[in-house]
């Protein structure tokens, strides 16, 4: 096994960097969803928030961007998880899978921050997106 792993001493279970990134990406997704919910409640009011929401939110600005950011993260997190879990179960854990996970993690955090903030300098959001894809691909390549 290459690279650090978090070990649960009681159970003897290794939680690799790759799985830790999956978990922390889930935390990021949760935070983004809570931000979007808060923004929608602020824009649309408590009556809308506590209703069946038959009418979609008309919130714009950072609230609309954070929603798009979490939907994008959700799509990529499903793919990352579908790659990482079988790779982990197959016992594949090496410098390349660790690097792929680290790239994915940093890229998705940067993507979420710049998207939500509305920063649109030199295509940084798009670069962060593709870096995350590359991180996932590095892990997938180790399985084939």
Image (spheres, rainbow, N blue to C red):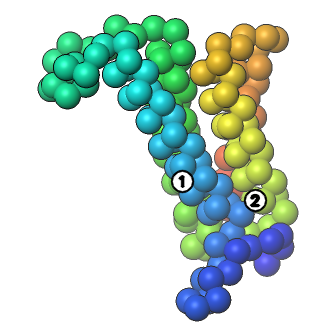
Using a 10 Å C-alpha cutoff, classify the residue at mark 1 as few (fewer than 14 neighbours), some (14 to 19) or many (20 or more).
Answer: some
Q: Which residue is mark 1?
A: 81
Q: Position of residue 14 (x, y in %)?
A: 65, 79
Say which element carries label 2: helix
Q: Which residue is mark 2?
A: 97
Using a 10 Å C-alpha cutoff, classify the residue at mark 2 as few (fewer than 14 neighbours), some (14 to 19) or many (20 or more).
Answer: many
Is residue 61 rendered to the left or right of residue 19?
A: left
The residue nearer to you, when weighing 121 against 132, is: 121
Pointer 2 with pointer 1, Cβ within 8 A: no
The residue nearer to you, when weighing 142 against 74, is: 74
Q: Residue at x 64, y 72 (%)?
A: 15
Residue 119 visible somewhere in the drawing: yes
Above or below, comparing residue 37 to residue 107 in the picture: above
- Quadrant in which the C terminus is drawn: bottom right
Residue 54: image quadrant is top left
Say which element carries label 1: helix
Q: Of callouts 2 and 1, which one flags the residue occurring earlier in the amino acid sequence?
A: 1
Q: Residue at x 19, y 20 (%)?
A: 47
Above or below, comparing residue 9 to residue 24 in the picture: below
Give the spatial CA distance, label 2 vs label 1: 13 Å
């Amino acid at each position: 096994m290459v690279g650090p792993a978090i070990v649960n001493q009681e159970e003897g279970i290794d939680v690799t960097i790759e799985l830790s990134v999956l978990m922390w990406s889930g935390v990021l997704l949760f935070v983004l969803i809570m931000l979007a919910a808060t923004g929608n409640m602020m824009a649309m009011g408590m009556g809308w928030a506590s209703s069946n929401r038959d009418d979609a939110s008309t919130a714009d600005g950072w609230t609309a961007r954070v929603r798009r950011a979490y939907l994008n993260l959700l799509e990529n997190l499903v793919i990352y998880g579908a790659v990482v879990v079988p790779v982990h179960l197959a016992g594949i854990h090496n410098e390349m899978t660790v690097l792929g996970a680290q790239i994915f993690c940093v890229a998705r955090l940067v993507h979420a921050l710049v998207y939500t903030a509305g920063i649109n300098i030199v295509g940084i959001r798009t670069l962060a997106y593709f870096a995350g894809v590359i991180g996932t691909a590095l892990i997938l390549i180790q399985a084939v």
